Amino acid sequence: MHDQEKIAAIITRLETGTCTPQELEWLHEWYQSQDMQDSTAFRHESHRQQLRTEMLQHIHDQLDTAPVVTEGRIVPFYKKWWAAAGLLAAVVSVSAWLWHDYRQQHTLLLVEVGPGQQRQLMLPDSSLVWLNAGAKLKYPRTFSEVRTVELEGEGFFDIHPDAQHPFEVHTQELNVQVLGTSFDVKAYNTLDETQVTVKTGMVKVLHHQTGLDVLSANDQLTYSRSAQQYMKSTVENDQINEWANGMISLSQAGFAEVALTLENQYGVRIRYNPAEMKTFEYTLRCSKQLSVTQVLDIISSIHPILYDIKDNEITIHRKN
């Protein structure tokens, strides 16, 4: 157990009155070895006062009123009391520091990208992320030993190199582990396939905790949730993050992915019969500046379709 975890456990037992004298002694020795400044990062002042009162009462309960013989010397009660008072001050300081550190590492920030938008942001470690329309990213205010983010949707990552702190992207199906590289992850929960594409460097792709493959530049891994298997292929490097440069870019995409792309880009709702469109695949590259009807006409030139637009809803049928 790391010191920080042990300290947190001891403080919890201090609050519940179950801390042992040995733990108090360990905490006191640990605190004496540190060079920290007091913090005021409590949830609120009443929490500080409550914690101080509870710890004071517990330390008082741990003390005997009789003198104690230690290595042939008699230690009067009042000396033990002042030692405990010093420990109390130390524990309150450590508690504040731990709470601040815990809050920084465990409070997740959420970034959501609306229809027709994309967002660029810098993470706490100076890594850069571009998020496509409809994407959601969760990340902590401060990274811990492993720099971890959670992604739903599509994001392109340019990771700041740090060999001591690996970077991980967690999606519903896949985890991507890197040290310093740039890569694209497409992981919309409504789609069957999750895709990881490397632009520079190398990444390791896992299905939960099971390693699938290692990818280098221009490699693309496509994982199928329904089939529980993946396929590895090679792509053109300049096409990997075209969407971040104002393009709609799809390669051998099923109609479900096409429909989701239109919904995210134009804020519309697409209705269609999956059975009608299940055999269609689309490779599509066009500007996001085009209107939705212009894009639908391009799609129809690949596999003929009929579409009807009413308000914010588009109904699409296969053209026989």
Image (cartoon, rainbow, N blue to C red):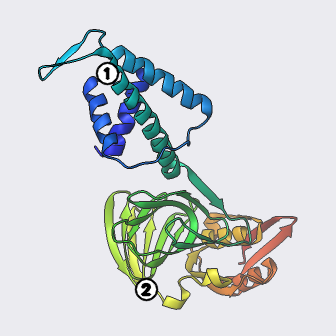
Front residue of 220/297: it is 220
- The residue pinned by badge 2 equals 218
**129 displayed left or right of 298:** left
Q: Using a 10 Å C-alpha cutoff, classify the residue at mark 1 as few (fewer than 14 neighbours), some (14 to 19) or many (20 or more).
A: few
**61 displayed left or right of 140:** left
Q: Residue at x 49, y 43 (%)?
A: 38
Quadrant in the rendering for residue 86: top left
- The residue pinned by badge 1 equals 79
Looking at the image, tell me whether mark 2 or mark 1 is earlier in sequence order.
Answer: 1
| Amino acid on which disc 2 is placed | Asn
Front residue of 130/116: it is 130
SS at mark 1? helix
Residue 55 percent across, percent down from the top left: 43, 24
The quarter in which the C terminus is drawn is: bottom right
SS at mark 2? loop
| Amino acid on which disc 1 is placed | Lys
Residue 307 sits above or below residue 7 on the image: below
The quarter in which the N terminus is drawn is: top left
Label 1 near label 2: C-beta < 8 Å? no
Q: Residue at x 56, y 57 (%)?
A: 138
